[in-house]
Amino acid sequence: MSAALEVIAPGLHTSVQDLGRFGSQRMGVPVSGALDTVSLRLANLLVGNPPGAGALEILHHGPTLNVRAESVRIALASGGEVEVPGDYRRSIPACRSARIRRGEIFQVGALSRAACCYLAVEGGFAIAPCLGSLSTYARGSLGGFEGRALREGDLVPLALSEAGARAELELPRPPTGGRDQTIRVVLGPQHDHFTRRSVAAFLAADYTVSASADRMGIRLDGPSLRHNHKGYDIISDAVATGAIQVPGTGQPIILLADHQTTGGYPKIATIISADLPIVGRRVPGDPIRFTAVNQQQAEQIRRAQEAELQELIRAVRPVPAGKDLDLDSLYHGNLISGVVSGDD
Amino acid sequence: MVTPNATSRAIIDRLPASGERPEVVYRYAGDRFILLEYGDIVLDLRMNFRIFGLNDAIGKVRIPGLIETVPALRSMLVHYDSLELSPRRLIETLKELEAGLPSVANLTIHSRRVQLPIAFEDRHTRADIQRYVKYTRQDAPNIVNGHNIEYIAQYNGLSDKNEVIEYICATQWWNACIGFWPGLPFMFPLDPRYAIVTPKYNPTRPWTPEGAVGVGGPCVAIYPVASPGGYQLFGRTIPIFDLQQRNPAFKENPILLKAADRVEWVAVSDEELEDIRARVYDGTYRYKIVAYEALNVRSYLEFLDLIKDEVAAFQKRQSEATKHVPVP
């Protein structure tokens, strides 16, 4: 039988995502892709994949998976923890790669600090791309594993039947971007459809992520905004990911990865690309405050973020001896030094 | 951070209208997208034609850092990699392309002609409309004799549902843009003598069969999958979206229609449609697509000029009728 991860329990919403599906929006197909592209890239990096390889996006509560391969190398980023119960019980923290053997069951429980995290497997999944991408657009039953989130009993095919022989890797620290960071926006494209007072209120308000938050978007709780004489109906236009759309009710909605390609309401502002992954990690109840920057500043912030990420990538290091509990060492009699006198 | 004042210009650049060229407005949509708009905030197919002209022109030049363009009715979203291409440079390039673009009248737009069979008042749209009456709204004025087609007649001042059918089949339908759902066309009649309009459902209909065809405002849409919807339905056609690619028409792409296609309706009976749909899925039906045609805008505008009195007469009849018909 070919190598696969067997889904024992799917978690809340676990789907295959990559960096997104580009070039098909003109046909009405959303971009989709990871809500937190920074974490996706880091998870892939740790298992030696190209940064945009398809990985499992885990929302709120992770899956329980059984290894149906000789072994598989995995890494989780940026939050969460992999628990491996069973005979050689261990936990693998986020931002560290590890090898898991045939028949071992591993699970990612509830995420405590973020809405999403990414489980990358070395070599990626053996899934054919749909319109050039592995990303799942579940509402349209398109892409990923059978066009949907994982279900109990699924066998998600792995590209490799065995983990490569190499040292495990870890990041010295997770990427930055906390739950209280102010989110930066570029005003527009249609903030001229709002009263000046509403634009000011939007930038001054304390919004909260409402319970109505998913891969399509986040409805915000907080001050409602008023359109000016131009009204809230526009001729439908194409929508950028990160746009903050305000329908007639005045309650803003942040449009995320699975947003529809066109929309008929004015967009007061657009979240800068550097802050989109941070917004993607927010959970219902989290505060959201906005501040305006101009396009040039947004670009500088993105360049700085990219430089910081490259620095983090350069700092990736082999897992220090003693922290790396690998079954090979157990099988080869190094159990004593590896466990009993382990220095962590 | 800066104050809102320093960032508050919605429009970052514009080309004033000149001769036959409409005003072009450029807006930021974040740090990776430029939104370009033509003309006034009204629906005018000439603006849509120009969007296609520009999109073709963009396709012919290589712009390093350009990721994709998303054309809509009178606007286009341009996605670029800001680490590779500056918005200033991008806008300069877009302006240069504008300068090189022929006037709308001189555009020739590559446009496939797609013939689709349609069963008017078919059993599946009828069933979902019945469910709406049963579970959502009993007294919906837009449902007459269990369907929307007679309401469409009333609202447009047409004598009966047969005249609605006649109107829908009398014109080609221009697919101005795809959006809202993968493969969902927003189509407008190329012959405005048959430009039916309707208000939408209120509240929205929770069910619509895949392949349903309906009208909302001035726009006709085909539902690619079963979904909620708000358009007044008049019939059902064959699949326009098939991820399983069960017919050669979907071999290259699970989405049948492209923007700038022209759809022609061919009325068939409910039974015939069932039979054709079965042949779509067993792979033996051949979609009727004439790939190598074009829309010559000049001839089209000349045609519009010829029929303008008839268009005005229909619009008068329509607006008279609308006054006496309840809105849902």
Image (cartoon, rainbow, N blue to C red):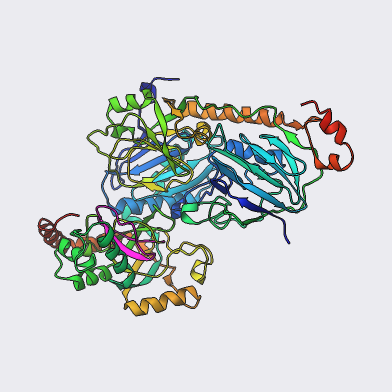
For the N terminus of chain B, the quadrant is top left
Residue B75 seen from this side: no
Q: Nearer the viewer, residue A6 or B168?
A: A6
Q: Is residue A250 magenta?
A: no
Q: In this rendering, would A117 be left or right of B5?
A: right
Magenta region: B201-225
At 41% from the left edge and 47% from the top edge, which residue is drawn?
Answer: B100
The residue lying furthest to the right in this view is A333
Q: In this rendering, would A81 be left or right of A197?
A: right
In the image, is residue A233 above or below residue A310? below
Q: Position of residue A259 (x, y in %)?
A: 44, 45
Residue B242 seen from this side: yes
Q: Main secondary structure of the magenta part?
A: loop
In the image, is residue A1 above or below residue B246? above
Q: Is residue B216 magenta?
A: yes
At 24% from the left edge and 33% from the top edge, which residue is drawn?
Answer: A228
Q: Position of residue B86 (x, y in %)?
A: 50, 34
Q: In this rendering, would B309 be left or right of A64?
A: left
In the image, is residue A189 above or below residue A216? above
For the C terminus of chain B, the quadrant is bottom left
Q: Nearer the viewer, residue B83 or A128?
A: A128
Q: Position of residue B185 (x, y in %)?
A: 37, 59
Q: Position of residue A264 (x, y in %)?
A: 33, 45
Q: Which of the 4 quarters of the picture holds residue B205?
A: bottom left
Q: In this rendering, would A230 be left or right of A177?
A: left
The residue lying furthest to the front in this view is A87
Q: Nearer the viewer, residue A229 or A206?
A: A206
